[in-house]
Amino acid sequence: MLTLTHCLPPDPEAAIALTLSLTADDRTRSRHRFETEEGQEVHLKLPRGTVLSHGNCLTDDSGNITVLVTAKPEPTLIVTAHTPLDLLRAAYHLGNRHVPLEIKPDYLRLTVDPVLKSLVEQLGLTVQEETAPFHPELGAYHSPHGH
């Protein structure tokens, strides 16, 4: 089994050998076994606290093999509003519940949860289910490099 120990930034020039498609939750696991798109089992043994992003490259200690991380589409809720203030209000209420949240200028994305869907609908916002890659905010105290 291939043990991946190093995370590298996206590199369009990298010679990619394998692709590892992970959900948002899976991308927070620094020590776990996964199967690549090609069917090869790999073991992540990354520094604790590493959060992977779409496009990161992983390699083993030898650096001879490069595995591309991609964001796996997963069931999500897309929240839209008539005004930016309404969307901001929804982000506030979801943030109070410490919900992983993808924040864009014209929508919010979160994992499917019937209680949160109802809450957002009660605020007067539109909610639709969509299977798509999910990229939640990392948080104020987390750098993009896992430090």
Image (cartoon, helix red, strand yellow):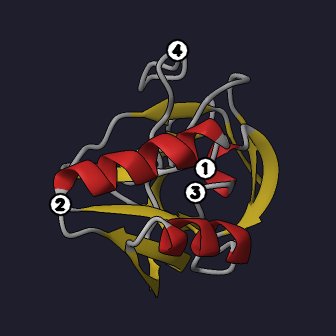
Q: Nearer the viewer, mark 3 or mark 1?
A: 3
Identify the residue position indicated by label 1 in the image: 27
| Kind of residue at badge 1 | Arg
Question: What is the number of callouts on the image?
Answer: 4
List x then y, in percent, for residue 29. 73, 43
Q: Which mark is in front, 3 or 4? A: 4
- Drawn side of residue 17 relative to residue 116, left or right: left
**Residue labelled with disc 3:** 24
| Foreground label between 2 and 3 | 2
Position of residue 129 measured from the top left corner of the image (x, y, whole percent): 49, 86
Q: Quarter-wise, where is residue 20 in the image?
A: bottom right
Query: Tags 3 and 1 in contact by the CB under 8 Å rule?
Result: yes
The residue beneath circle 2 is 83
Question: Which label lies toward us, 4 or 1?
Answer: 4
143 up-or-down from 71: above or below:
above
Taking the spot 67% from the left edge, 54% from the top edge, the residue there is 25
Indicate which label's residue lies in the foreground, 1 or 2.
Answer: 2
Three-letter code, disc 4? Tyr
Percent position (x, y) of residue 138? 49, 34
Above or below 38: residue 99: above
Does dot 3 land on a helix, a strand or a loop? Answer: loop
Q: Which amino acid does label 2 sit on?
A: Thr
Read off the residue under disc 4: 141
Q: How many neighbours does mark 1 have within 10 angstroms: few (below 14), some (14-19), or many (20 or more)?
A: some
- In percent of width and height, residue 96 lies at 61, 37
Identified at 73% across, 23% down, the residue is 48
Which secondary structure lies at badge 1? helix
Which residue appears at 46% of the width and 65% of the height?
Answer: 123
Secondary structure beneath label 2: loop
Q: Distance between the residues labelled 2 and 3?
A: 28 Å
